[in-house]
Every structure is written in structure tokens, then in C-alpha cells.
Image (cartoon, rainbow, N blue to C red):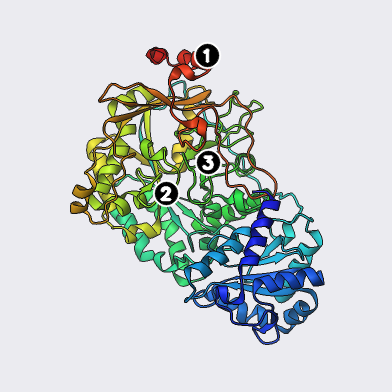
Amino acid sequence: MKPTNILTVLSLALLAITPASYGVESPPIAKAGAPGLKWVEPFEAAGQEAKKSGKPMLVFIGNTDVCKDCQAFAKSVCTQPEFVDYAAKNLVCTRVLHRKDETKDDGWKISRILEAFNIPSSHAVIIANADGKRIGELSSAPQSIAAFIQDIQTIVAKAPPEGRLKYCEASMLDKTFIPEKSYKSDPPKFSPEPLKGRYINLMTAVRIQSWENTRARKHGSNMERHKHTPEIALKMRKSLAEAYPQARITWAWSWGALTDKEQNYVELRKLMPQFVKEYGDEMTFWPGVDFANKFNTQEQCKKDLHEALELVSQMVGNGYRPKSVIAGHMSVESMKFLAENEGIHTVQGQIWSQFNIDGQDGDGGIIYPYYPSKNHFLKPAQGPRGGDDFVDMVNIDGWTVDFFAARLRGMGKDYNSRVGIGPIETQAYYGYDLGLREILHTSDVHFNDKAVAENGYGFLTVIWELTLFEWLDPNYLPRWIKAMREKYPDTQMLTTGEFGDLWRKHNPDNSRINLKFVERGNNMPTEEEGKKITPKYRFHAPIFCPEMEIRWYFNKDFRFATIQNWKENGPKLVMDYTRYNQSYKEPSGNVIERHWDILDIINQKQSRPQDKPKPFAELPQEEQAKILKWYPELKDLKQ
């Protein structure tokens, strides 16, 4: 979204809000808030006063009814005479507060303001210029009032006219981050043989709330503090060890979880050295609780990565250093920084088929690991190791999904595009037994003997936030692991860093990537039958269609997929053809962009008119030839 569009949204939100519209009964100007501090409310009136006076705005966003950190900010910072005096002379201060008794319409209007300021489900302290454009963001728990005021002055002094949308600490504005300490790692001794076997990456994540987009935002409406306890972690890890004694998993920690001083987080951090020593687990950083590059400047991302990895090393002790980072989506610039400055060469840096869900889109990549291009994290590097287009980072998917679900966009009343082996989308939708059935169905697509024989190896990946273990069912995770071990006894569960190192050893570059998959729709019960098993069962025909078959092909040059009604021997229609020799660029700079996709000739999500599945013959002749050169067995598609 361009800055002009955001300002348009903000202007519309301002016009739509009246004092009563979000539970504020004050007159348009100057309701008394904390003693001595003048709050100008509602937000519309504050915007008008700022424009008239030429003063920048301090916008306090949150919920003082339930958020302890919001209450602390209001009672401490906002009551300090030093700040009150500074604000009276230099700022227009206003509040946008959620309330317990707000209506749905009230909440919607507030959400429009938050969206314009790039604040999803968090509390925040925003500095805007006199035109209402966001120019900076502050922590609600400053080290001192003097430092707080200094940061405001720095933001105002360095603000560009068009505003500043991505977060950056005031001290980092317009600076290049240079770590005080760098790490290097030697390249592996590359194997002449391709990778073999069956592998599962299980990652678990520890956070404060659902979206900790920036260092300044670690609190909001979806708090999870009470769900992160040593007791839950010990119970989860013990149950996994009982299901698979040799299993090794990766623990990813958000910035908030790494630095929080509440006792449960202090005690939970003390368990990490024990898990590393006893189970061989990996501890690492989880920047931005996914999508850090969307919300933070590139230099802030580098600073967060470096300092958080140092905290992880201190947390575990004994010279420990993680081998991977868990990131949701990560820009190639951040990947290069990790490889060149932190000695880390594996990242969970893409979420395959992510589109219209969870705040950032990224469809177009390869489902299994690859080295990314220097231009886009979803594009596999086209040249050799060490070449101009090569980044020495193994980019791994976060959630293995059902290919039929992956065709859908986002989630709706009765469907979710992330259905696969992820626990929320399976047990929450389909219950205990049918949820496991869907997980095993998706797992078999990758682990069946034919797929492993053709591809050399099978790979499953999933992230279980620690909160899910107790919220869903403590038996759900070990039951899946036991079922997988019984059916595929050669399965190895490695940490993300271990698996990345192994894949890297067997793949000097992307030339060995040649993957083929076949999936027929899961034969799940009808809606009526399913509800007899679990009342919350949601049947969705595009996912559960046993008469349909999807075939996927991936290599460094392109990805290609067909869909067919195999029971009727219908035509195999092309549903995706994405070329990797095209010039793709990631969003860059300080503008907030949701779409980080690669959408080429035809895309599985069908978000454009051209994406309707079509006969192979309708592809350009040169593209047909390219596909058949890789896969001559598809020559029947020309008929």
C-alpha cells in the first residue's frame, strides 16, 4: 500500500469517528486524562488541532481496561511533570482506546485507524506529523522520561515529508547497522549423492502475544502470557519424547519472550539449556512473530537478529550458537545478513501458498528447501554457488499443507487455506479423529514410497506454538508422531538447523531440485456424517474431493501443476505455471506492502482472471517445450 493510499484510509477513518463512536463522551477538545496531561479527543479533533497548530501528534493506542502495560504507560509516563510540560508545549496528545463495552461498529472504526498506522492487534505509542502521517513509533516502557522525549525530538527532526511507516528505534534512524561481533562458518564437504530419507521439522514457538511485530509492540488484544509456563513446556516435551525418544525439535523465541521479566518467562528460559542437553533441541529467535521485514526497516531487522541471537546464546550458555532462525517470511537482505555476519545458513523463511491470510502474502515458491535468489526470497537462485544470484541460505517452508487447501485464498466461514498438518486448521476444524485423518492424508502425499523413490526424500514441516499444546489436546501431537513412526519407521525428526545443514551438504546449489507429487482429494465424511463424529465439523468440497487429482512439479527453472477429475478420466488442466527465470523484486524501502508473491503466467490461487485452469495447449509453445524437456512423460498433455 502506498503512503497516499494509507493517508486516504486514515482520512476516511477520521471523518467516520465521533466522540460517541468509540465510547468517549468528552467534548471535542481537551478532556483531562492523567493529571496535568491534556488529551485531545476524539481522534478527529486531535487531527484538526494538529493541522491548525502545526504540532506533531502523540497517538496512544491500546486498551486501558485490560492491558497492564497500557495502564502503566498512562500512570507513569503520562503523569511525569517533565513529559507533561514538554507535551503541552510541543505535542497534540490523543488516545485511541478499545473498551470492554465497545460495539462492533466502534471496534471497526478503531481498526481503520490502527490499519492506517500499521498497528495490527497491539498497543502502541505513535508519533504522527501535523498532517496525520505516521513518522515514528515508541516503546510504552521507556528507559527514562528524558530518553522518551529525546526519541520524540529525533523522530520529528528526521521525519521525511511522506511519513515513515516501518518501525525503527529512534537511535537507528537513517543508520546502517554494523554488528559489534560477526560469525563465520565453513562450507560443508559436499556429498556427490542426493539427499535420501524421510524427515520432519517440528518447531515450537514462545511469545507474549499473537503479533509482536516490533520491539515496541509486545502487548495487545491477544495476550498469551498465561499459556507459556514451565509446566506446559515440560509436559509437551516429555510427551513428545515418549512418542519418539530420538526426536529433536526447534524452539523459537520472540523478542518479547526473550526479554520479559515475568516469572513464568524467567523460569521457562531456564529450561532451555536442559532441553538442549537432554534432547538435543535447538533454541533460536523468532523475529516479528513472522513477517518482521514487513513491519520493521531492514536495518532494524538486522539489529534485532543480531542482538536476539546473542540473547539466545546467553540463555543456553556454554558457547551455544543456533544454526537456524524461524521467521515466517524473511527478505533476502536479512538472509544475506545471517549468512554473511551471523554464520547461519538455514531459515524457515517462507510459508508456501500463503495468500490472503495472517497479514502477509507469499505464494509462488518451491515447497521443499532451496537457495533463494538475491532478488526475491521466493525465487530459487538460478546460478551456481558463489554466483551473482546465489544466497547461501537454505530457505525452508513453515507449514506443510494439503494441495487442495492451498488453492484457496485465506480463510472463510467454512474453509481454511492452511489445512494440512498444522494443528489449528485440522483439529479445530475437524476434531480429534478426523483432524488426525487429514494430517496423515497430507503426510502420506510426501512420505509414500513412490514419492520418496522419485524425489529421493520426503519432508514435512510444521510450527506448533507452545500455546496450542494445552489449548487443543495434549494427546494430539504425540498421537500423530506415533502414527507416523508406525507407518514410516525410518522417519527422522531433526531440528531445523540440523536438517538445513544436511540438505545443504547434499545440494551445493539448486541444480538437484526436481520434485514430483500426486495428491487425490481426501475422502472425508459428508457434512451430516462428519457432525455425528464432531459437532464443529466443517466440510468443504474443494478440499475433500476424492474424484480430483493434483500433480505438482518443482525445479529451479519453474513450478508446474495440473488438476484432473481422474474418476471420469477428465482432461489434465494446468492450474499453475510459475517461471523462475523472470525478473522478480521484493518490496523494499519504508512502504508497507502485503503482497510479496510471485504471480506469473497462471497461479493456483485463481486471484486473477487469467488463473482459471486451462488446457496445456493454451500455454505459449516455447513454454510447453520447456516443461516437456524437464518432464517428457507429460507429452500426453499436448493431446
Left or right of 496: which side holds 237?
left
Q: Specify the label residue 411 is tagged with.
A: 2
Closer mark to the observer between disc 3 and disc 1:
1
Q: Residue 543's image quarter?
A: top left
**Of 25 and 432, the residue lying toward us:** 25
> Identity of the amino acid at label 3?
Gly
**CA gap, disc 1 and disc 2:** 36 Å
> Identity of the amino acid at label 1?
Gln
Closer mark to the observer between disc 2 and disc 3:
2
Q: Name the residue at 51% across, 58% down.
A: 211
**Of 8 and 390, the residue lying toward us:** 8
**Of 393 and 443, the residue lying toward us:** 443
Q: Specify the label residue 621 is tagged with.
A: 1
Q: Secondary structure at mark 3?
A: loop
Q: Residue 472's image quarter?
A: bottom left
Q: Name the residue at 80% across, 59% down.
A: 158
Q: Secondary structure at mark 1?
A: helix
Is residue 561 something that shows in the picture?
yes
Quadrant, the C terminus: top left
Residue 321: x and y in percent read 53, 48
Q: Specify the label residue 362 is tagged with.
A: 3
Estimate how packed mark 2 is, as few (under 14), some (14 to 19) or many (20 or more) residues with alpha carbons within 10 Å.
some
Left or right of 72: which side holds 169?
right
